[in-house]
Image (tube, helix red, strand yellow):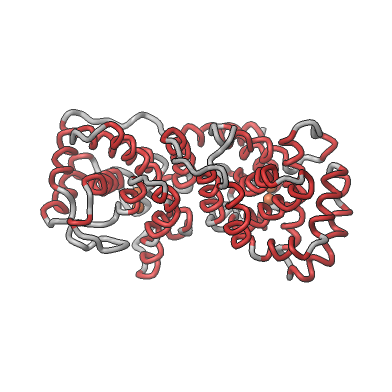
């Protein structure tokens, strides 16, 4: 199945910004692309390798609930801890990664790459395209793990020998393609600036044929994947994005907005906190008041949200604007741009109210969840102070009065349940 360039572009961006995984993923991605180019000779297949490289360690993005993960300081696993010491999670990350990707239509073509990237060639099928890509990514992974520990000018001298030592885990043609790729200065310079390389070299290849607008169904699926990545990090937010999506959509309906706008409100909700992937967990989960500088870091997530969603804004969608404005306030006291009422559409106002309501009714490390009534009266104060929209608030009051309930389980929670089950069965 073909994926639109904007989507791939987006995955690169979101993954490369995750602390601890980002740099490694980018490097493996750039290398996989270049080895793939040697192997296949065409940029299309090479870019498949590049994306596979970007996603290969996605299985490290796991919810924190298992004993086997006690060594992980961040939910986005610390790679040097994992690659080596904690062997149970190390083995698990390929299974989990393959599983997570298989849940998403557009990503399941990369599921095998995550699943097999540490599997030796002797156990792979050379007639399967994805197995070859997994092996290429495996080669890139070996190189990256060694190269990250030294100057690349030194690495380029010693890594050919490391690859020769690993010859037995690679297909003969992958072995050759890898040696050819790393014999070129070009490859090392790409690895030294993998983001620069991607943005200017790989992404144009990927986006070449994809100029049309990303379909709404694709956005919803990407939104669910994004919600998983964002919300799984903290046990306090596992319903967050999806609840805001549902509530925003329902508020849109209550206010009589057209159906396509309701759908875009739903999408805005799924993506609104995407910028949190770039915020450290120690800040997101701090069990007490944040210091001034921590609060500054925390608030920055909306800056990232706006930048992340740029592609979709360029495609003519308006939901990225609403998503990025969920912390703005009508009186100009919000962030990141201190917008005021005249700049804030009804849709942005809906996101603002939905975000506040959902946040109040969720538990936080430093307080209990508020009951609906208490949440409403807290929001009423904001409305009276001229910060949140009165019209949207009234719609929310009506919904709650009529016994509004959220869906029992979010997709994020369902995936988390399955991952938990997988981990437990592996621990046996
Ligand atoms: Fe891995
Ligand atoms: Fe890796
Ligand atoms: Fe937010
Ligand atoms: Fe939020």
On screen, residue 408 versus residue 375, left or right, reads right
| Relative depth, front residue between 69 and 339 | 339
Total residue callouts: 0
Viewer-proximal residue, 320 or 61?
A: 320
Left or right, 127 with reference to 238: right
Task: Locate the C terminus by quadrant.
Answer: top right
Q: Is residue 7 visible?
A: yes
Q: Indicate the position of residue 125 as horizontal and vertical percent values.
A: 80, 32
Q: Position of residue 159 (x, y in %)?
A: 82, 61
Quarter placement of the N terminus:
top right
Identify the image quadrant of residue 235.
top left
Q: From the viewer's perspective, is residue 185 above or below residue 271?
A: below
x then y, percent, for residue 269: 35, 43
Instruction: Let me know if residue 64 appears in the view.
Output: no
Q: Report the residue at 20% width, 29% height from top.
A: 403
Residue 74 in picture, x, y percent from top left: 54, 54
Q: Is residue 336 left or right of residue 177?
A: left
Between 355 and 222, the one lying in front of the other is 222
- Above or below residue 7? Residue 404 is above
Question: Looking at the picture, does residue 33 appear above or below residue 406?
Answer: below
Taking the view exactly as shown, the residue that stands out farthest to the left is 384
Name the residue located 61 percent from the left edge and 56 percent from the top edge.
198
The structure residue drawn at horizontal position 84% and vertical position 42%, both measured from the top left corner, is: 171
């Amino acid at each position: 199945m073909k994926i639109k360039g904007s989507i791939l572009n987006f995955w690169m961006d979101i993954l490369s910004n995750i602390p601890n995984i980002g740099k490694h993923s980018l490097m493996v991605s750039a290398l996989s692309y270049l080895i793939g180019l040697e192997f296949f000779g065409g940029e299309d297949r090479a870019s498949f390798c590049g994306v596979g490289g970007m996603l290969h360690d996605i299985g490290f993005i796991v919810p924190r609930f298992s004993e086997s993960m006690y060594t992980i300081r961040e939910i986005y696993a610390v790679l040097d801890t994992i690659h080596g010491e904690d062997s149970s999670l190390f083995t698990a990350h390929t299974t989990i990664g393959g599983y997570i990707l298989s849940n998403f239509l557009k990503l399941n073509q990369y599921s095998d790459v995550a699943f097999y990237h540490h599997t030796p060639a002797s156990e792979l099928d050379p007639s399967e395209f994805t197995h070859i890509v997994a092996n290429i990514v495996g080669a890139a992974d070996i190189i990256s793990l060694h190269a990250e520990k030294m100057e690349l000018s030194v690495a380029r001298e010693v890594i050919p020998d490391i690859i020769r030592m690993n010859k037995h885990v690679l297909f003969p043609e992958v072995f050759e393609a890898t040696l050819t790729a790393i014999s070129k200065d070009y490859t090392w310079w790409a690895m030294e600036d993998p983001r620069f390389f991607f943005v200017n070299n790989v992404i144009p290849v990927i986006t070449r044929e994809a100029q049309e607008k990303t379909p709404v169904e694709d956005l919803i699926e990407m939104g669910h994947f994004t919600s998983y990545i964002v919300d799984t990090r903290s046990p306090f937010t596992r319903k967050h994005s999806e609840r805001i999506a549902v509530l925003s959509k329902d508020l849109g309906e209550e206010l009589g907005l057209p159906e396509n706008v309701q759908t875009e409100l739903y999408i805005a909700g799924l993506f609104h906190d995407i910028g949190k992937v770039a915020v450290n967990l120690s800040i997101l989960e701090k069990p007490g008041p944040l210091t001034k500088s921590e609060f500054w870091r925390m608030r920055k997530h909306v800056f990232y949200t706006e930048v992340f969603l740029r592609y979709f804004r360029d495609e003519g969608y308006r939901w990225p604007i609403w998503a990025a404005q969920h912390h703005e306030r009508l009186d100009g006291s919000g962030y990141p741009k201190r917008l005021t009422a005249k700049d804030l559409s009804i849709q942005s106002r809906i996101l603002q109210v939905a975000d506040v309501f959902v946040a109040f009714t969720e538990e936080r490390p430093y307080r209990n969840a508020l009951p609906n009534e208490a949440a409403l009266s807290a929001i009423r104060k904001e409305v009276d102070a001229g910060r949140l929209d009165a019209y949207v608030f009234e719609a929310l009051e009506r919904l709650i009065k009529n016994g509004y309930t959220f869906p029992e389980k979010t997709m994020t929670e369902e995936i988390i349940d399955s991952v938990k089950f997988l981990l437990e069965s592996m621990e046996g």
